[in-house]
Image (tube, rainbow, N blue to C red):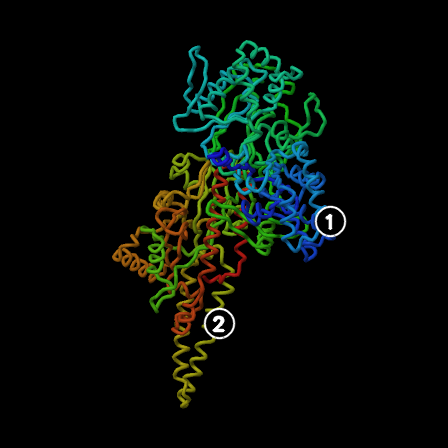
Amino acid sequence: MSTTEGARAPEPRVLGVPRMGLVVLIGVSGSGKSTFAARHFARTQVISSDYCRGMVSDDENDQSAGADAFALLHTIVDIRLRRGLLTVVDATNVQSRARGELVRIAKDNNVLSTAIVLDVPEALARERNRERPDRDFGDHVIRRQRRDLRQGLKRLSREGFRRTHVLHGPEEIDGATVALERAWTDRTELTGPFDIVGDVHGCREELEELLGGLGYELSRDGGGRPVGARHPDGRTAVFVGDLVDRGPDSPGVLRLVMGMVADGDALCVPGNHENKLIRVLKGAKAQLTHGLAETVEQLGRESEEFRARVLAFCDGLVSHLVLDGGRLVVAHAGLKEEYHGRASGRVRSFALYGETTGETDEYGLPVRLPWAREYRGRAAVVYGHVPTVKAEWLNNTICLDTGCVFGGKLTALRYPERELVEVQAHRTWYEPARPLSATPAEDADRRTDDTIDITDVGIGAADTAPGLFVETADGAVRTDSGGTLAALEVMSRFAVDPRWLLYLPPTMAPAPTAADPRFLEHPNEAFAYFRGAGVGEVVCQEKHMGSRAVAVLCRDGAAAERRFVPGELGVVHTRTGRPFFQDPALQAEVVDRLRRAVTDAGLWDRLGTDWVALDGELLPWSAKARSLIREQYASVGAAARASLPAAADALRAAAARGVPVDGLVDKVDRRAEQTEAFSRVYRRYSWDTDGAAGLRYAPFTVLASEGREYSDADHLWHMAVAERLAETGGMVHPTRYRVVDTTDPAACGSAADWWTDMVGTGGEGMVVKPVLGARARGRKGLTQPGLKVRGPEYLRIVYGPDYTDPERLAVLKDRNLGRKSSLAMRQHKLGLEALARHARREPLWRVHEPVFAILGLASEPVDPRL
């Protein structure tokens, strides 16, 4: 056997490529770039010069269109990279000038560039081109391209490519595989829970105390020094950098944090102080200022091995971390949204130092640009770097540097709970250049959390409204431009102060059309819907004929000032966010009565809160709809009573003369009876009120209180709270309800009989909801939060007095409920999202985004009678 026959085939090359970045294929014409791209990348990821040439000239081989083709190619590449998409450029790219423009675009978008070179023998390239009739250029072109390729190979790294893969010959090209690698900053698979610790600056004792307060159990070496800490519940600590300098024991802090990171109990990003320490440990010259001299002196007492460990640890830290599916970003000095998950010198510099104006303040410190003031990112950004007296949320960002080394505090944020844990500094270890009490220049006129910009609701400066696209926990919801503009009109002119608007109720879908020919709606169809969805138990609630009202109530003025609007104690608003009462004195009286009920029920202490939001119905219907009743419903009854008797008399007189009008007489008599039934309905839901004295409020859901929302609580819990409130007397009205097993025919039949009795004695109907609560899920995901089943008499004021006539009822049974059901579900998702964001203490504009979208969807063309 020859040596050649016994030789092993070379191992296939694995080419690492960032999932988000630019890939430039380089090779002469005929090297197989298009084939390689099609084999290893998705069709949409590949942008070829031939394709762009065809787009601008209808001929992929029209060389005269080259300038326009590459202008288009560069535009597409720029857009894709800006959107964070992997982009592969399929062109010869053998000239440095062509590659340079692509690398520049990648750098502008803060992504990495990878070069993949396909180096094939010149003879093979010539042969392949001769086999293609569209390649009619001479061999000299291949020769020139290959010469350019050879000259440029050694310069690729200097041109800005972070990684270069050179494949020699067809065998190596065909055997290669591409492995997509995520960025070092991408730790989205880590969901926590986390404890994010602010700038430590060598304060080891305070760090030990803080970790202990957070529940971590420290481990120590033989000398008693802390070398690790683990939380018994599996929580992970995250350090925002600046572990060193100024404080008394930077080596001790490093030893503890490095041990935690090595054991998988912590993550860490670098601070600007670690960045400077790296240069010193590598032997570079640096000014030993801002506490670096103390760290160098302290490390000088440690072993060479320890200093080497410190260098390796600090040098290996990445600029920032993207965690929890992209919902959390940790960076030492913070990070603008367009930099999240990106990699470039610009991104690293921002993460370490922030942005400055180039000026210095009266303390000689750099004046920083207020990036957090304008932040509108979806991810919460947690950072340090700028000492402040108190850690506070601003536009979904929070700075945890509370100046421990300067005599302040060491602060940690518990995530996702968004709770702060602090320990007081044991002493002032280092005198600050700027007193902690001094407000940084960038915060002097900062835009606060309770500001909403018109762009936050999808409307631009040119009065264009592309609509909103809102991400929720149950999928994205989109509103159109018309709905957005309509919502803007309502919100800007009629709504209560937006700080009260943490939620708007969704519309409610009716039960599927009844199979019973006598009814348009019946409980059996509601039970069948939930049974088909896999929901075994439902609660049937009495449906009050009132007006939907959300009540946000504060225990005292301090709670209102802290969370809502100073000087007010609460609000009652409609389902469209308008004040329920135009008279401020009446509003205040109703709020006061509801607050008294909450106090008497012991709800403040029971929920551990100083404010609460309730959803319910305010009775009577006439309290809100008096003009509607007078102008629309009462006028119908009055007109009928005035005209129908005269018509009946005339018809009877005609019948006496022998005119065959008996059928018309019966019809008019029946219409008179129907009209009286119609009038009895709306009169039943109307009564006179004297201020707040005659008003009743029937709550059925506790929406939220401090730090939480209650969509995960079952409806029996909500009804128990409502019962407790009703037991206090006052204006809180009880709601009758019963629990039904949808799989038990007898239980369903009994509930249907209860509904029949209720609507037969003047009740509007009932609402059927999953017992498990607003987030109940069935076989196909989130279910309808409730289906309304209205009684036949009540439906007269919806569809008209004569809707029960068989011919009319037959037409109504063909009503299309799909659009209404879809609208109810989309608004329900948005409502849950708004409550969740408010509970997480996200900024007002984030809470208002789904609230605004709910109102935007309300203008969709859906039959209002459904």
Residue count near mark 1 (Cα–Cα under 10 Å), binned few <14, some 14–19, many ≥20: few
Q: What amino acid is labelled 2 in the image?
A: Ala
Q: Residue 671, position in %: x, y?
A: 41, 74
Q: Residue 725, position in %: x, y?
A: 38, 43
- Quarter of the view holding residue 230: top left
Viewport quadrant of the C terminus: bottom left
Q: What amino acid is labelled 1 in the image?
A: Ala
For label 2, the residue is: 639
Q: Residue furthest front?
A: 1
Residue count near mark 2 (Cα–Cα under 10 Å), binned few <14, some 14–19, many ≥20: few
In this rendering, does residue 579 appear at all?
yes
Q: Earlier in the sequence, mark 1 or mark 2?
A: 1
Q: Residue 827, position in %: x, y?
A: 48, 51
In this rendering, does residue 408 appear at all?
no
- Quarter of the view holding residue 112: top right
For label 1, the residue is: 67
With 161 as the anchor, is 699 left or right in this view? left
Figure check: 562 above or below 142: above
- Regarding mark 1 in the picture, which secondary structure is present there? helix
